[in-house]
Every structure is written in structure tokens, then in C-alpha cells.
Image (tube, helix red, strand yellow):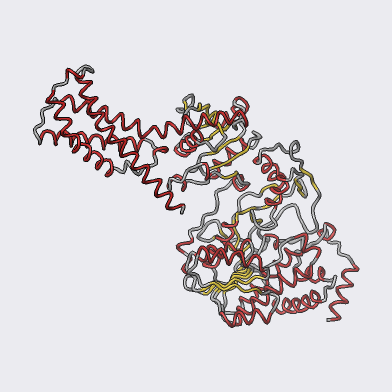
Amino acid sequence: MKSIMERSSSRTVVLFLVIIDVITINLSSFLALLFQFDLSLHNIPEAYLTAVLRYAPLHTFLTVCVFGIFHLYRRIWRFAGVYELIHIFYACMISSLLQIFGMSLLSFNISKSYFLLDFMIFMVSEMGIRFSCRFYRIFIYRAGNNVGILKKRAANVMVIGAGSAGSVLIQEIRTSRELNKHVVCVIDDSPLKKGRYFYGAPIVGGSSEILKSVKDYRVQEIIIAMPSASRRQIKVVLDICKHASCKLRILPGVYQLINGDVSVSKLRAVEIEDLLGREPVNIELDDIMDYVTDKIIMITGGGGSIGSELCRQITSYRPKRLIIVDIYENNAYDIQQELIRTHPELDLVVIIASVRDERRIDELFKEFHPDIVYHAAAHKHVPLMENSPNEAIKNNVFGTYKTARAAAKYGIARFVLISSDKAVNPTNIMGASKRICEMIIQTLDNHSETEFVAVRFGNVLGSNGSVVPLFKKQIEQGGPVTVTHPDVIRYFMTIPEAVSLVLQAGSYANGGEIFVLDMGEPVKIADLARNLIRLSGYVPDEDIEITYGGLRPGEKLYEELLMDEEGLVETDNKLIYIGNPMDINENLFMQQLKELEIIADSNSEMIYYKVREIVPTYKRTQEEKAGKVSNAEKLAGDICIKDL
């Protein structure tokens, strides 16, 4: 019904324009004669008047056809611009030339000046008729807005960027009835533009004028329209804007301009990743992803932050089958429905299963026999795992061990482990468990045709449990924003960056490597919290309080990406490095794993001692870092080992 109404409305508009054009065509011809003879009807020669009247039906028909060819009846005139103006000119010009040719061919007697006057009057009239819709939108709609401002004052907006994107955005803001905004000033670093007006708004200067202009013009919202600027350039602007206590919005990227997809609806809130201070790691996957095409891919933990992004990216390269294994049914269901919607052609299998269930994992490998396994299933929350260390070991260590052994048993080509920077000199059970996982895949790689590799990276922005979603929620609730320690620093990367690294690692894999990403400079968490508060339009410690609760169990002030003894080997990517495999006493390690499994299954408190025995760099407390280990814990560990 809606479609029928829309088509009916469209036909009505076309009919209305045709009727208006018919009137305008003939009225213009008559006015041309009238102006030619000093606005005196009696002075018009009868021969001229007869010629115009006799040619009028043909002239009207041909002109309407020309307008139809130029699509002047199918355009949305309330958004008309220079492009439409040019087409009106061309259509009127061709109509006039046809009139000259037709009247000459039919030997109608009329003066040459008539044709020029007729063309001028007709063109101006048509432009006025077509653009009246736009004029109505600009003046009437804005007048309506101004009335609405009496009820709700329009927000003063500063636009940064006097380019193509800024032009489109300002025009939409100025002509929209729905947007209660008023562009009061524009910022652009080009000295040639300073002092000029950009769609009615003054260009007040470069980025150095931002804070001053915010005060002078009482700016409430800043829109950054610099889609072609680099991440570093954006960061410089944001570092200034975050002190302005204004709401910030940004146009996503240069592709918006390429696609002509620039509008207020495409603006997004400024995210904290805009302040990382480095360009995103762009990995050209198209040249390397042949290794997943027509292959059976299994992703454990496929419903999680990293696992689900792996699913999204891998499906673009036409795998033969994608198998998602996850214990959490809600996450698995969400990614399943998304992939069914976006890739209906995909052979998708979703399995609810635990990697801790050795028999179930064995059955899955036997049934589906995947070519490549991405192992993302793990417990990752540091404080929670400190309270449940046995569960961390059961899931992370032995979930990895059982899955990796199944991969080796069934001759899987590649096995990629998702690891963490917390595996380096760990101070928590989660990090220590990840280090043991790395040792497992390095050990199995020496005894299997399967290529086992690990991928190690830092904190992932926006992932489940990361600080950014937590901070945003706390800001929405009015604070306080809770930070553990004012000096805590972390490496950060985006989910797509992390997944790109994982996929590239799969292509580089020769077996036994630990891949590490150059993540740039680490970020202080307290600064991250302050920046996010400012980007939300608040003043830290005034509008939103920041509180410090102290380091949580297992946390340290900074994370490392590499142990001293591992070293680095650069890959072709230049931003991805390989840590050299460490020497592992495999016999001792396998014996220690058996003992650890018994301790974990019994939920013994001695698990910390056994983990430290396997991972000598694991230190739980400051006292332990100084070499002071509890004698009681040592004794308890010895008793536990004898019982084995």
C-alpha cells in the first residue's frame, strides 16, 4: 500500500510539473513578444503573433520531451544544486534551438531578437519554478525552526573542516527542519580561508583558534568533518577539543566522500580509539587469505569478541565450511543469526560444546575434520580468575591442551592459539595459564605435522570486559569512573586489528612461532578515562569524578609483549614480529601438566605453587617478586606432589 501511494504521489508531481511547464512555455513566448514591443499588445505585428500561436503546440510538445530526456521531471528539487542548474540551462537551450530550427523550416515570419528574449525569460522562469522547492526548504523550514527555537534553543555548532564534507554537512544542518542546530563558526588550517564565510558561517582560523572560538561563540557541539585526515592529525585536533567541554562528533572516513555518503546521519560520536595516537594497523588480507578459501574452518569461542570478528572476516573469503564452537549459547546464537543474514550462502555449523570435554572435542574433530582451527575459547577476566584459579587452569590450559591434541591426532593443517600480553612475566593466574598454553603448542608442534602457532596482543578496545565499555557506562550513570591506579598503563588495539593479526599469523605459520604486534606507545588508563569523560562533554573531577581503588588481585602497573629471552624477528609486515621459541624440557613439562591437571580437578589451593613451578616468571605478589616464597606453600606443594 505504501509503495502504491508513493508511486501515485510521484505521478502527481510529474503531472503537476508538466502542466506548469506547458503554461510557462507559452507564457514565456507571449512575454517575449510583449517585451520586444515595449509591453504594448497593440504594437505586436499580427504576423509575429500568428507565428507564435501556430507554432505553440509543436514548441510545447518538443520542449516537454526535451525536459523528459534531461530527467527534469524525476529529480528531487528540494535538494537541487549546481548540477541541476546546468541541466535546466542545457534543456532550455536545446528547446530554443529547436524552436529556431522549426520556425525557420516552416517559414514563420518573426524577428531574431524574439528567440533571445524567449530563451532568457523561459530559462529564468524554469529555474525559479524548479528551485522554489529548495528556496521553500531553506527559508520556510528554517523559519519553522526559528519558531521552534523559542521552545528549545538551537545548539551552537562548530564545524572543523571547510572542505567538501564540511560543505555538505553545513548545508544539511542549515536546511533541515529536524536538526535543532546552528553552525556559528568554522575551523580550517588553510590561511587562505581565514576571515571568509562558509555557507554563512565565518571561518575563524586554524586549530589554534578552537578553544577561543568555543568561548566567543558559546559553542555547545563540535563536528569534525575531516574524513581524509590521518589518525595522527585527528588526534591533534581531539587533544585540543577535549578541553572544550563540548559534545564531539566526527565523520567516519574518506570513503564517505568517495561514495558521496556524507550526511549528518553518518556522524558518530568520537571514540577513544581516535586518541590512540597511531594509524590503525592495516593488513592487506586479500593477498594472503587464499589459505582459508575452500577450507573447513573451526573457531572455538566463536561467539566472543575476537571469535565473532574472526567469523565475520573469514566468511568474506569463501570457506568451504565454518564451524563455530562455543559453550555460551547466547553469543553463539547472535553470531549465527548475523552470518545467516549477511552470508546466506555460507555452510555454517554452530556447536554448543566445551573445550574441556575431551570426548566431545574428539568427536567434533572426527566428524568435521577441519583444515584450520582458531582457538579463541578462554576465561580472560583477570580478577575473576584470581578468585577461581582452578577454573582458569581447567578451561584455558586443559581446554587448549585437549583441543590441540585433537588437532594433532586428526592431522589438522594449522592451529592458531589466541594468547595475551599477560602471558609475559605474569602476575595473575590468567596470564600464567596463557603462558602454559603457549608452551603446550610449542611442545606439540615438535611432535606433529600440524603447524601450531600463538598470537599475542594487548587489550582489545570494545571487547567484552574491556575498560572502555565500563567507563562509558559509568559516565552515562553520572560517575564516578573507577580506575585501579593512577600509573597503570596498557597497550591497546582495536578488534579488527587483533583479528587481522590472527589471520596473518595463520598465513605466516611454519610452526612453533609466537606472533607479536607492534602496538605503538602504551596508554595510561587514567588519561584514557579523563579523555573519554571530556569527549563525552564533561569536565573530569568536576562533572564526573575519577576514583582510584588500587590494583586488583593479579594486576600489575604495566604489561609487556615479549620476554627478554624470546627476542624478535621481523616479518614482511613490518608491524608483526615473531618471538623466538624458548627451550622447554618437554618430558618435565608433560609430567608437570599431569600433576597440574590433578591439582586443578581437585580444586586444590596448591595450584599457585604448581603454576609457578611450570612458569618460573609467574609472581603473585610483591613479596614473591623479591624472592620471598611462603614456606607453608612450598610444604603444601611438596605434600601435594607426593600424593600424586
Say which quadrant the C terminus sits in: bottom right
* Horizontal relation, residue 290 to residue 328: left or right: left
Instruction: In this rendered view, identify the residue nearer to me: 590 or 628.
Output: 590
Residue 285, position in %: x, y? Answer: 49, 61
Q: Residue farthest to the left? A: 107
Q: Can residue 135 be seen in this view?
A: yes
Relative to 415, say whether 209 is above or below.
above
Instruction: In this rendered view, identify the residue nearer to me: 265 or 103.
Output: 103
Residue 135, position in %: x, y? Answer: 42, 31
Instruction: In this rendered view, identify the residue nearer to me: 464 or 511.
Output: 464
* Horizontal relation, residue 125 to residue 555: left or right: left
Relative to 221, say whether 420 is above or below.
below
Q: Residue at x 64, y 65 (%)?
A: 331
Q: Can residue 580 be seen in this view?
A: no
Q: Quadrant of residue 639?
A: bottom right
Residue 163, position in %: x, y? Answer: 46, 36
